[in-house]
Amino acid sequence: MQKHFREMTEEEKKRVIAKLEQRYLQKYGRKFQISTKEAVPDTFWGYGLELSRCIGCRRCVYACMKENNHSRHDPQLQWIRVLRLKRGNLINLENSEHYYDPDLVPEKGFIYLPVQCQQCQNPPCVKVCPVHATWQEPDGIVVVDYNWCIGCRYCMAACPYHARKFNWWNPVWPADMEKYLSPNVSPRMRGVVEKCSFCFHRYQLAREKAYMEKRTDLAEGEYQTACADACPTKAITFGDLNNKDHAVYKLKNSPNAFRLLERLETNPKVYYLTTKKWVRKAGDNYLAHEEPETLKTRIKEHH
């Protein structure tokens, strides 16, 4: 019987990783390298997203799919949804339109809101997993052990951002595409729940590079997510939320910053920025008759 990943010794982890890499080589004809480096404490990865710059092109979505070896099964499984919102409307994370297909973007009268795992500091998904297949690392990133996940989907029900996706099918790609899969991200099997990892494998690669150069710290920009790299308008700023020298630290403290559904007190690490008051209000899904401060007090009393 295999132990839970967090209970394994380093030697046991190496044996399990070797078996997985061999399995993927046989199945996909591609050599994968899975890193198990532990997270660095005192860092808090997150990003700021300037909504005035987002044009709804969805390049972040497809960069994420390519980087993380998403299956191309129809319908495609995507970790990022870009919501198209008509000006003045409330943000409905469950029913908002994200399969829009205009001739050109951005469209007049709309704004666009990318949503994926918010890497909450108080993640409800972690609390409900009956087998502890998902947990939060010291650097704040919520991870999933796909080999431990039993596919019960409790985490999907608990996530208020609809950020977790159940994989109904074994991964498939167009002919010969398997040759071009990223070697640092293992494909996920059918029957597990997937989600954004802030491209954690890129963090591991950046740390290994720093180690080879006899450095312990990463400079700003050495670790970047695929979505941030792909954004043509540079709407996404990624970095260490604890580091005062990082641009994202300044963004999160901007008076224009807000987080989705803040009243639930999940404490996301994704900060959205806008000067439009209706967008900030809509981001917490307040109804017209609700007063934010009164509602927050009522929620605290309930808990």
Image (tube, grey):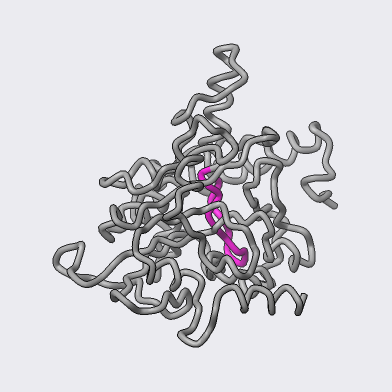
Q: Quick check: 7 left or right of 194?
A: right
Task: Point out the stretch of residues depicted in magenta.
Answer: 186-199
- The furthest residue to the left: 103
Quarter of the image where one finds residue 217: top right
Q: Is residue 73 above or below residue 223?
A: below
* Residue 74 visible somewhere in the drawing: no
- Residue 172 position within the rendered picture, expressed as x and y whole percent measured from the top left: 44, 59
Residue 213 is covered by the magenta coloring:
no
- Residue 174 position within the rendered picture, expressed as x and y whole percent measured from the top left: 34, 56
At a point 76% along the width and 79% down the height, the residue shown is 302
At a point 52% along the width and 67% down the height, the residue shown is 169
At a point 64% along the width and 73% down the height, the residue shown is 296
* Residue 248 visible somewhere in the drawing: yes
- The furthest residue to the top: 214
The total number of labels drawn is 0
- Residue 232 position within the rendered picture, expressed as x and y whole percent measured from the top left: 26, 46
Quarter of the image where one finds residue 281: bottom left
Query: In the rendered view of the protein, which quadrant contains the C terminus?
Result: bottom right
Judging depth in this view, the residue of 80 and 297 nearest the camera is: 297
- The furthest residue to the bottom: 289
Judging depth in this view, the residue of 221 and 153 nearest the camera is: 221
Q: Is residue 217 above or below residue 181?
A: above
- Residue 13 position within the rendered picture, expressed as x and y whole percent measured from the top left: 76, 38
Q: Quick check: 209 left or right of 14?
A: left
Magenta stretch secondary structure, dominant: loop
Residue 194 is covered by the magenta coloring:
yes
At a point 55% along the width and 35% down the height, the residue shown is 203
